Amino acid sequence: MTEQNPGAKRGPILIELDEEPTITPSTADPVPDLARPAAMQRVAVLAARKPSALARWFWRLFAALFAFTVSIVTYDAIMGLIAAHPVLGYVALGLTGAFVLVLAAIALRELSAFARLKRIDTLQKAAVDAMGAADLKAAKGVTDKLLSVYAHRSELNWGKDRFREREAEVFDADGLLGLAETELLVPLDASARREVEAAARQVAAVTALVPLALADVFTALTANLRMIRRIAEIYGGRSGTLGSWRVTKSVLTHLVATGAVAVGDDLIGTMAGGGVMAKVSRRFGEGVVNGALTARVGVAAIEVCRPLPFMKAKKPSVSGAVKRALTGLFDKGAG
């Protein structure tokens, strides 16, 4: 055993490497956040799943029983109040009647919203059938209904006038529907794209810049619901509360049916890992991912709510929407 000098100075130990490291903390890819896309897929699948017949009957009977019970209790309470205190009883009767009228007005508005949404769905299916059969008469019926849907849209007056001037020059179904798309739907497509980009930008910014727990989840939920509702309104399918849920469910069903929930994850991962700020901060990478998922939902909402399928106009892409929405946002943050 050799004796060590306790008074000897101990300096740092230098370990020489044969090669320079190829990966450094500044060049390494960010850790992928796999939980968010997986959660998004589960939510879409669960929302798009049709309830069983037993579950539908359960909720129908529960609603009927609840309404019956509330009616009986309210009737007994008002009759008892009229017998004991007539003035107060008739006041309660008047308030109850006003409440029932408001409920009836809300129900009529919801039914009207469902009728508008059904009209849009019917137009889209009729346009597909007319193109498939090359039926000019059927295409003419579709365009007439489309003009009636947008009869009160003053911002489309110029496009409606141009369509009426040129429709007599078209002698095939594809050409007539393409003319209607160009003159009537292209301006609406631009407005819908702006809504998608604004929602994607908002979700990405809140995810990247707000460190509060669940803030990004709440923002993504509210922004997506508002975006879907605005896109439906842009294309003429103004919806109430239940109508908005119907549109949202249709959009999620479309995502699952077309496989758009799972397709494109590599593209989103590339966008999330390619930016400077995504490599510096994981939250900025999460912001890009959430923004891309919002854009994907927005593109699906456009396809569902549009009265005509895409023919001559270019179909919006998720990558293009994300690029326009996030251009400058993270670059400024990096600067």
Image (cartoon, rainbow, N blue to C red):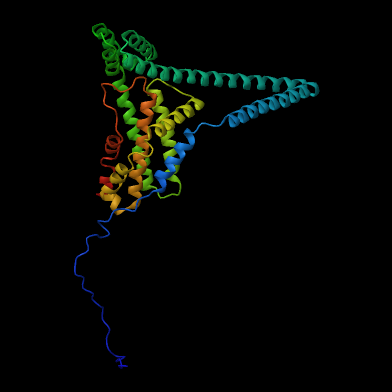
**Residue 245 relative to residue 155: left or right:** right
Q: Is residue 303 above or below residue 166?
A: below
Residue 110 position, x and y percent, is 52, 21
- Does residue 219 appear anywhere in the picture? no
Q: Quadrant of residue 324?
A: top left
Q: Is residue 64 above or below residue 133?
A: below
Q: Quadrant of residue 23?
A: bottom left
For the point 35% across and 31% down, the residue is: 299
Q: Is residue 96 above or below residue 248?
A: above
Figure disc tally: 0
Residue 251 position, x and y percent, is 42, 30
Of residues 222 and 296, the one nearer the viewer is: 296
Q: Where, quadrant-wise, is the N terminus in this rendering?
A: bottom left
For the point 68% across and 27% down, the residue is: 65
Residue 263 position, x and y percent, is 34, 38
Q: Is residue 268 above or below residue 25?
A: above
**Residue 136 relative to residue 48: left or right:** left
| Residue situated furthest right in the rendering | 84
- Does residue 250 appear anywhere in the picture? yes
Of residues 147 and 38, the one nearer the viewer is: 38
For the point 34% across and 20% down, the residue is: 308
| Residue situated furthest front in the rendering | 133
Residue 238 position, x and y percent, is 44, 22
Q: Quadrant of residue 161?
A: top left
For the point 58% across and 29% down, the residue is: 53
